[in-house]
Amino acid sequence: MGSLNGKVCLVSGASRGLGRAIALEFGRQGASLVINSRPSSAKELAETERQLNRLGAPVLSVLADVSQRADVERLAGEALMRFGSVDVLVNNASALGPTPMPYLVDYPIEDFNAVLQTNLAAPFMLTRALVGQMLAKGSGSIINVTSDAGVVGYPTWGAYGVSKAALDQLTRTWAAELAGSGVRVNSVDPGDMDTAMKRASEPDGDASAWAKPETRTAVFVFLAADASAGVSGERLLAAQFVAEKGERS
Amino acid sequence: MRFYLPPELEAHQPAELRGVRRDQVRLMVLPRLQGPMVHTQFDALGEFLCPGDLLVVNTSRTLPALLRAHDEEGKPVEVRLAQRRSDEVWDALLLDGRAHIGQAGMRLDFGQGLTATVEDRRPDLPFLWQVHFDRCCIPLLDLIYRLGEPVRYGYVEKPLPIDLYQTVYAGEPGSVEMPSAGRPFSWQVLLKLKNQGVGLASILLHTGLSSTRDDQIDLTHPVYDEQYFVPEATARAVNDTHAHGGRVIAVGTTVVRSLESAAQADGSVKAVRGLTRLHITPDYRLKVVDALLTGMHEPYASHLDLLSAFVAPARLQAAYLEAIQRGYLWHEFGDVNLII
């Protein structure tokens, strides 16, 4: 018996990196999965689906650009048609912006807007599309993937950092508005991980010093499971969670 | 029931696009038997409900069910999905403008690789054709989302995003028109009602088309068979509400149809998943539902028959005339009426 038996979990940006790792761990824990990526990552998403199939997890793959309003409704509709409800939403899909990463003064306005649309508007729209059926049931968990770039003003991380700071505030506001409803909203900062996005952002960085995404999933399982009932409006650090729980290193 | 609806009272767009919140549309409260009407705003709904009352909503999500295709000769065909019959077969209206078209064997090409074959007419509803798509299930749903637009009528000028056609509690998709009586609810209102002691329960009924686009057919008030689902929890909530003296308030005519279809002879409700052809007329004796929240319905609409099961036709007619005089807005994005 996994801790997510019987739960339906939707993970955006599940074609690679942390999103794939979360989806696979949720699958191991007994969840049914709706996994999503942009159409340009179709092959990688199919690989995530294959790995979930091997785990025996029921899975629906939906290619959709969650920064687009119509795609969000399509993704929500297909998930609800396939499984009847969605219990857990992980807003993981994220855009870094142009690379090499420019200073704000050099940031193209179109790119700035696109980053905010994917990292901030998309979690808002996807939550809005799915939270109603959670409220009607009186339970649900929404997890937003954030970053320390939303707390610290790192040079060149402008649009990304701004979007993550705003996502943290979105998390707190959702949590406050939904307090007592049974629907919980939290954010998780996974820390530095060896992902394609991280390598793109720091091409000269030491990848060996970065954690593997698979080692950062325990906190997501915790927040998705009933064991965390009552936890809402929190910003959790994945590495600290692992250290305290001693489950993975 | 006959009345003249001035065109300026047709709501062309959702409240939010008119500059007001969805829960700030107008609310006309009509006592079923006697007493004056009250004209207020929807977010004051709680003033008319009591602790122990139960709101029952339809959680069906709305699909973009208007598809555009071409036949073998390249002529455009408007396909309005009406009801899903199986994983790959839908009942549909086939239109050229407002003219009904279609013939058995017709091939339809929707683009993006989606095709369908027109099979037979529905014997009981001959204006509907059975359209057999070349795929089923989620792949078909995916293309309906990609290719479709919300079903709309003349008073809505251009297609609007499909999310504007959803209630805030919408779940599984399947309705071809919005179960619109519930559209004014915000979660702010629903959570306030919950704190007030008003219960919330749900049914699922995927709505069909409200018009065939042919006035003569519409005047006959064709009765559609519709899939509905009353969950165990809802049946229990309804029965408990009545046992404790509370009122069951249906949000929309689809909820009335579902609950009354699930009613037992003793007035209790049982959980059921089935097909209903129940047609509620002024003579129908309601077994379960005590009050109704509903939109403002068009002249001659079959929904007005159903409303007359709650309130005498003459009283309803007087209420509608007063609503017109006071400038209430009609249709799915308009104002609402609580008959209680």
Image (spheres, coloured by chain):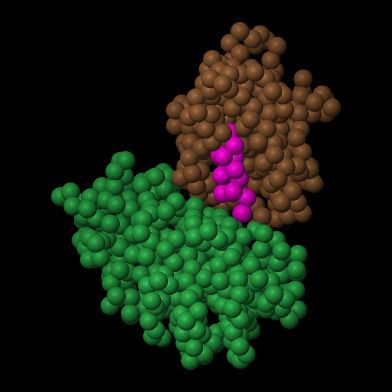
Chain colours: A brown, B green
Which of the two residues, B27 or B81, is positioned nearer the viewer here?
A: B27
* A6 relative position to B20: left or right: right
Rendering coords of residue B258 (x, y %): 54, 72
Q: Quadrant of residue A92?
A: top right
Residue A70's spot in the image, x, y percent? 46, 45
Main SS of residues in magenta: helix
- Report if residue A18 lies within the magenta region: no
Q: Position of residue A191 (x, y in %)?
A: 71, 23
Res B261 visible:
yes
Instruction: Determine whether A122 is above or below A140 in the image.
Output: above
Bounds of the magenta span? A119-133
Quarter of the figure that contains the N terminus of chain A: top right
Residue drawn at (57%, 74%) of the image: B27
Question: Is residue A132 highlighted in magenta?
Answer: yes
- Vertical position of residue A29 compared to residue B58: above or below: above
Depth order, front residue of A161/A44: A161
Observer-nearest of A132 and A14 = A132
Which residue is drawn at the image coordinates 70% and 55% (left, top)? A138
Residue A186, by quadrant, is: top right
Instruction: Name the image quarter holding residue B79.
Output: bottom left
Nearest the eye: B93 or B323:
B323
Q: Residue at x 47, y 81 (%)?
A: B325
- Residue B307: x and y, percent? 50, 81
